[in-house]
Amino acid sequence: MADNVRFTLNFPFQSATGDTVTSMSVTRLKRRELSTAQLHAKGDEAALEDHLVAKMLGITVEDLMEFDIADSKRASDLFRAMVGGGDLAAFLGRSASASAEDAAVGD
C-alpha cells in the first residue's frame, strides 16, 4: 500500500472546528484499534464500524456522522477492503505509487 493513500470526499463538509473537510489520509488499522473500538461499541456492530472507520480516516466519530451517505458507503467499503487485507490504493482505483496524487480518490 502506498504511504500517502487519501480518501477524497465527493461531498465535503464543515467540521466542528469550522474547517472544510475534503480529504483525509488512510491509515491501516492494528488489532489494538479493534480492541479499543469494541470497548466503546458495547456489542453494537454499527458503532464498532463507525469507530474503526473514523480511526482509519483520522477523524472523530462526530465528523464521520457529517459524511454524506454516499461518502459514508465508500468509507465503509474501503474499511471492509482493509479488513480483507486488500491493497487500498488499488481498491480506490489508483496505482500503489508514492505519489499522493496517484493514491487519491475522487479528485
Image (cartoon, rainbow, N blue to C red):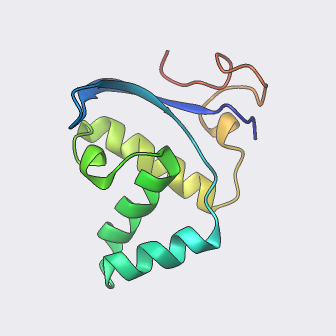
Look at the picture and state if 105 lies above or below 67.
above
Q: Residue at x 33, y 76 (%)?
A: 41
Residue 4 x, y percent position in the rendering: 67, 31
Left or right of 37? Residue 87 is right
Look at the picture and state if 96 lies above or below 91.
above
Residue 40 x, y percent position in the rendering: 34, 76
Number of on-image labels: 0
Q: Residue at x 25, y 28 (%)?
A: 13
Q: Residue at x 43, y 72 (%)?
A: 37
Look at the picture and state if 99 lies above or below 27.
above
Q: Residue at x 63, y 73 (%)?
A: 31
Left or right of 90? Residue 81 is left
Q: Residue furthest front?
A: 17
Q: For residue 89, what is the image quadrant?
A: top right
Frontmost residue, 75 versus 23: 23
Frontmost residue, 65 versus 36: 36
Q: For residue 23, what is the image quadrant?
A: top left
Residue 14 x, y percent position in the rendering: 22, 28
